[in-house]
Amino acid sequence: MKQDEFIGLEDQFGAHNYKPLDVVLSRGKGVWVWDVDGNKYLDCLAAYSAVNQGHCHPKIMQAMIDQAEKLTLTSRAFRNDQLGPFYKDLCDLTHSHKVLPMNSGAEAVETAIKTVRKWGYTVKGVEEDQAEIIVCDNNFHGRTISIVSFSTDENARAGFGPFTPGFKCIPFGDAEALEAAITDNTVAFLVEPIQGEAGVMIPPGGYLKKAREICDRHNIVLILDEIQTGLGRTGKLLAEEHEGIEADLTIIGKALSGGFYPVSAVLSNTEVMNVLQPGEHGSTFGGNPLACAVARAALQVLFDEKMIENSYQQGNYFLNELKKISHPHIKEVRGRGLMLAIEFHPEVGGARAYCNELKEHGILAKDTHENIVRFAPPLVIQRDEVDMILDAINKVLPL
Ligand SMILES: *Cc1c(COP(=O)(O)O)cnc(C)c1O
């Protein structure tokens, strides 16, 4: 079949809830992907950071095949021999005490919300049904009803009410606004260390440290959504490490499976996670042996193959080179590790057209909003490959 025929099938039979670039991929390896006509592209999105380890990593693939031949699903009605070791690996690596495994990122966010509400009522002593969670403008935490209830993106919300109450929005990066928003009913502050979908928005230095201090002072749970920033993306295992803090709850997903399988988790301290009792929360697939085996391998290769250091080094190089580009359309370049963006002046816009041009030069990147292009390649990228991206960016810029 030809590219157009695949696209036709999607258009005819699929829901139109995405507007993808018109490239139909059929193969991937490391930072490279190939379309059905055999054209090769450098992937600068990495499935929104779900394939940090590179496409079809052989060790993760082997772990998946080995486990698929043995046991794939028990449900949590019975125990399995992969879950305990997965918990231990995750806790050892992240200094967490407790893990609750789920599948998608949104499910893990929902899990965190339920958990801190219950903590609010049973430990903090908030009056029933009064719990408030503070979140930030321009957040992205997923697509469920509760999560879009506290989105500030009209596109994500319009037409989907009635919404879940109990959330309060404050500006991102503003510690004073956090302090001012707190009431006796506040149970948690939920924030992304760097806002990914908003366009790689990096808060002022010291923001997370201040948030940590404010949460401590008011007995509030600090929840970091590291679904996108975590697992090496920003040059550290978790982005919280850049400010030397530890969240009470950390949400991870995406690259936790290296792109093979939906695996997410809430990492927690003991006090908060211990409020959940049998029957109060769960998931048929959450913590299944296939997911656990894949996730353990995905974590292992991040360290064994020094992908986190590579993210830091290539990311610094990439950002420094981006900063050297001077073009009247560019408002700002920014990034941390391999999470980078070029923001064009709003009146220029054209991020989508720019991505289409990059595609013609063998680079797949995705626009966020009208005027921002994000660059987040797999963490296995090498210097000469970063140079290829820079070369394409330079060629396409005069637009
Ligand atoms: C992708 C993402 C989510 C949602 O994850 P899904 O697996 O798509 O449900 C939540 N938070 C952040 C920061 C994300 O990047």
Image (spheres, rainbow, N blue to C red):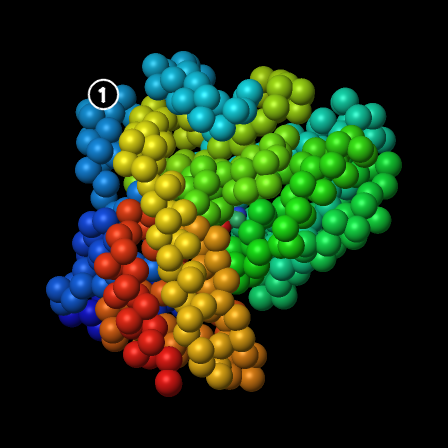
Residue for point 31% across, 26% down? 293
Residue shown at 46%/40% (left/top)? 236
Q: Position of residue 378 (x, y in %)?
A: 32, 50
Choose between 280 and 107: the one closer to the eye: 107
Placement of 320 over or under 280, stated as above or below? below
Q: Nearer the viewer, residue 278 or 95?
A: 95
Coordinates of residue 140 in the picture (x, y in percent): 57, 53
Instruction: Please state which of residues 61 and 148 is positioned toward the viewer in this rendering.
Output: 61
- What's the residue type where badge 1 is placed? Lys
Query: Is residue 119 shown to the viewer in this render?
Result: yes
> Is residue 202 toward the left or the right of residue 260 in the image?
right
Q: Is residue 256 left or right of residue 131?
A: left
Residue at the image point whose x is 23% and y is 41% from the top: 57
> Does 120 sit above or below residue 199?
above
Vertical arrangement, residue 9 with respect to residue 64, above or below: below
Q: Under tag 1, what secondary structure?
A: helix
Looking at the figure, which quarter contains the N terminus?
A: bottom left
Residue occupying image coordinates x 41% and y 67% = 322
In the image, the residue with mark 1 has its CB under 8 Å from the nearest atom of ligand 1: no
Circle 1 residues within 10 Å: few <14, some 14–19, many ≥20: few
Image spot of residue 218 (x, y percent): 81, 34
Q: Please state the total of marks drawn on the protein image.
A: 1
- 345 to the left or right of 220: left
- For residue 173, side relative to residue 195 (left or right): right
**Which quarter of the image is occupied by the C terminus?**
bottom left
Compared to 329, does 271 lie above or below? above
* Residue 283 visible here: no
The x and y percentages for residue 394 are 33, 76
- Circle 1 is placed at which residue position? 70
